[in-house]
Amino acid sequence: MIEKLNSTVVNEVEGISVITTPFTDNDNELIEIGFLNRNGNLELNDLGRVAGLLFSIGQHSVSSPAFLLVKNLAEKYNINIDYDCGVLSCSINDVKNYDLLLDFIKVILSVHIAAPEVKQYHNITNIVRPTVGMDDDSH
């Protein structure tokens, strides 16, 4: 173990540093984020966990609500989506730019929390479709 800060643990695993957050995903596993420091650039990735989440909840198609959530957050926070490897990543040129690091972590945590809820909401709204402006006499 390299460092422990308020229940957040940073370990090195196979040459990659891994931040283990105190937050759990949909499968009740701790959410982790990988990073490397290469020549002064901090390279972050989600270790493929978001893609795994989307597949496990059946929201991996590009038109699904949870996927669209991920896509919108990635665009907003300049996060790359590698469709071939199933990884969200970003590169930070200034390792002391903690705002970008925190933004990346915030997006990953938000997706893990919100995606299953977005799926549930989408399923409910597909089952119950309100009929606006219709009453019993209009049938």
Image (cartoon, rainbow, N blue to C red):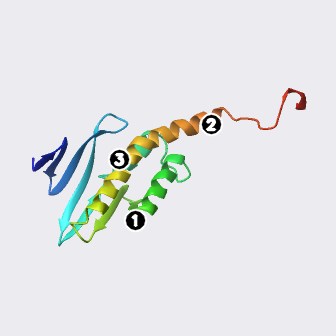
Kind of residue at badge 1:
Asn
Task: Work out whether 7 lies above or below 139.
Answer: below
What residue sits right under mark 1 in the picture?
78
Secondary structure under the numbered disc 2 in the rendered image = helix
At label 1, counting other C-alpha atoms closer than 10 Å, the crowd grade (few under 14, some 14-19, many 20 or more) is: some
Kind of residue at badge 2:
Thr
Question: Could you tell which of marks 1 and 3 lies nearer the N-terminus?
Answer: 1
Question: Could you tell which of marks 2 and 3 lies nearer the N-terminus?
Answer: 3
User: What residue is drawn where x is 52% and y is 54%?
Assistant: 62
User: What residue is drawn where x is 69% and y is 35%?
Assistant: 129
Q: Residue furthest left?
A: 1
Q: Is residue 55 visible?
A: no
Q: CA distance from mark 1 to mark 2?
A: 31 Å
What residue sits right under mark 3 in the picture?
109
Kind of residue at badge 3:
Leu
At label 3, counting other C-alpha atoms closer than 10 Å, the crowd grade (few under 14, some 14-19, many 20 or more) is: many
Where the C terminus falls, by quadrant? top right
Secondary structure under the numbered disc 3 in the rendered image = helix
For this view, does 113 lie left or right of residue 17? right
Instruction: State the mark number for residue 125.
Output: 2
- Where in the figure is residue 39, as x and y percent of width and height? 17, 72
Q: Nearer the viewer, residue 78 or 49?
A: 78
Q: CA distance from mark 1 to mark 3?
A: 16 Å
